[in-house]
Image (cartoon, rainbow, N blue to C red):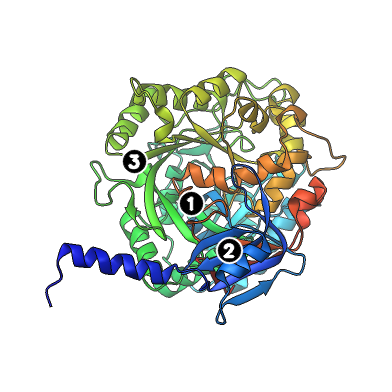
Amino acid sequence: MKFTPKLLATLLMAQCAITFAKGNADTIFYGGPIVTVNAKNEEVQALAVQNGKIVAVGSKDAVTKDWQAATTKVIDLQGQTLMPGFVEPHVHIIVTSVFEGLGLNLSNFTLPYDTKATLIAKMKAHLKTIPQGGWLFGFGVDPSRTSPFMAELTADDLDQVSKDVPIFIVNQSGHIGYVNHKALELAGVTDKTPNPPGGGIFVKDAKGRLTGKLVEPPSYLPFMAKMPNPTEAQLFGAIQGTMKKIASTGVTTASDMSVGGNFGVDKEVAIYKAIFAKNQSPIRVRGYLFSETLPAGYNAIKPNEGDDQLRFIGIKYISDGSTQGLTAALKDPYTYPKNSKWTGALNFKDADIYASMKSYFDQGWQISTHSNGDKAIDQALGSYSKLLAGNPKPQERRLRIEHFTVNNESQVKKAVQLGVVPSFTIGHVDYWGAAFNDHIIGPERAKRIDPAGDFKRAGAKFTLHSDTPVSNVGPLNYISEEVTRLWQLPPQKVLGPDQSVSVDDAIRAVTIDAAYQIFADNIVGSLEVGKQADLVILEKNPRKTPPAEIRNIKVKETWVDGKKQIL
């Protein structure tokens, strides 16, 4: 039989009519508030799913009458709340997998703070797990959350753990590292070794001797080159473990902002493709290639390559360091230590970062820039202004600035004009707010950290994220923190009440606006007919919960493409 174009079209239309016919839903949810996060922020009584997509939202009577069949699975929420699956716009999945899944996790987001003594004790206890010829590798030391304040590790401190086993510990920010003398020896880094390009620093004391402190990832490379690589099975297992952990928080889509940052872009892209080819990811992933690891003229991956499960959409730049690590690039000096004249430093010259961005922007890539300090924000906005010159619809490119931590009103205004969508690490308010206010940058600058209120008043979008492994994934925690802006350290205070937003605004920042930021708002981010059935079931309705308690709401189930994920 010959299939003419007309006949094929007729057959396809008939198939669609059968596939999406009313009275044939796979699943119907009812029995609790269904928060749609649509343009009107409506709540409905019921939602129907067919072939992984939402086919109806509305009253229980209408949805069940039109869509329920004998084979339909009907789920009574029993008062629990159904929402769009959360969208996490800024994580580092592979980095988190290596740091937390394969190394010693020293992160401490609770009270009391660690001390040098407790950190050394944890590392000593971990030594017995290190195989012959291995390294003690760890993550999560944070001097700004250590007692006494800013108690940094040195090579001498780490020698107390071991003089024979090489030790490499990464700071909680990811921008600073610490090594012992054995690691320096094996890496061949001496007092005379020049600093690497790209902003890396082998820190020395006043006498020109290495302290064991490293600044920015380029300085890590000599040590990483000597460390044994994990096996493929270990790495895949760690990545899948991290993905499941992310999904357990209700996240159904996440953006890995540093693809290529650990093992090179080709290998990490291949890892992702292998995981998704085997349907072994419980979340969708949007990938941003890490600019510093891309070979000159790189074009092996094309902009927007992939599908709705795995897609590569952007290039990520790191223009400065960490605010709590005192390496972010500021216009005015840090207020710690007292009378400091240090302002941090940019990782790139203006001309160099712009030239690199333009080469990828012209190919069609979305550009994302890590900018913690106001000097770094200026650099990003300056580059973006030139990239978008003459573009009548700059918002279509959805350029991103990550963190936007230390900022001023004029920068917010400029970002809005350029259609820039910032993403805030709201943990800066929660975990580090007291340190910023009392020590690092002072009250005037600290109150403007993560200026969600300013962007909301300007009618612009913003998103919230964890930057994991910098802080833990937890969208409900982000909502709670963005609304209350309470810092963790007692006595708790509100940091910058003018930058608070409503619960509904914060919900949008972790659902539909985050989906918009990563060019996925056409398929996820709200519960509307035609979108993928990416859902989260919550113990309580965050819209009806006191803001400070939203973070304590339990995530009961996570669904992707209409399928409950086994986590």
Report crowding for label 1: few under 14, some 14 to 19, many 20 or more residues within 10 A (C-alpha).
many
Residue placed farthest to the left in the image?
2
Front in this rendered view, residue 6 or 326: 6
Residue 470 visible to an observer of this rendering: yes
Label tally: 3
Res 7 → quadrant: bottom left
Front in this rendered view, residue 444 or 549: 549
Indicate which disc, 3 or 2, sits on the residue closer to the N terminus: 2
Q: CA distance from mark 3 to mark 2?
A: 27 Å
Residue placed farthest to the bottom in the image?
70
Question: Compared to 408, does 59 lie above or below?
Answer: below
The three-letter amino acid code for the residue at tag 3 is Trp
x, y percentage for residue 249?
64, 60
Question: Compared to 516, does 345 lie above or below?
Answer: above
- Asked if the residue at tag 2 contacts the one at tag 3, i.e. Cβ–Cβ closer than 8 Å, the answer is no
- Asked if the residue at tag 1 contacts the one at tag 3, i.e. Cβ–Cβ closer than 8 Å, the answer is no
x, y percentage for residue 558?
60, 66
Residue wearing tag 3: 365
x, y percentage for residue 198?
40, 36
Disc 2 is placed on an element classified as helix
Query: At 77% from the left edge and 42% from the top edge, which residue is drawn?
Result: 148
Residue 255 marker: 1
Image check: 174 left or right of 59? left
Q: CA distance from mark 3 to mark 1?
A: 15 Å
Residue wearing tag 2: 247
Indicate which disc, 3 or 1, sits on the residue closer to the N terminus: 1
The three-letter amino acid code for the residue at tag 2 is Ala
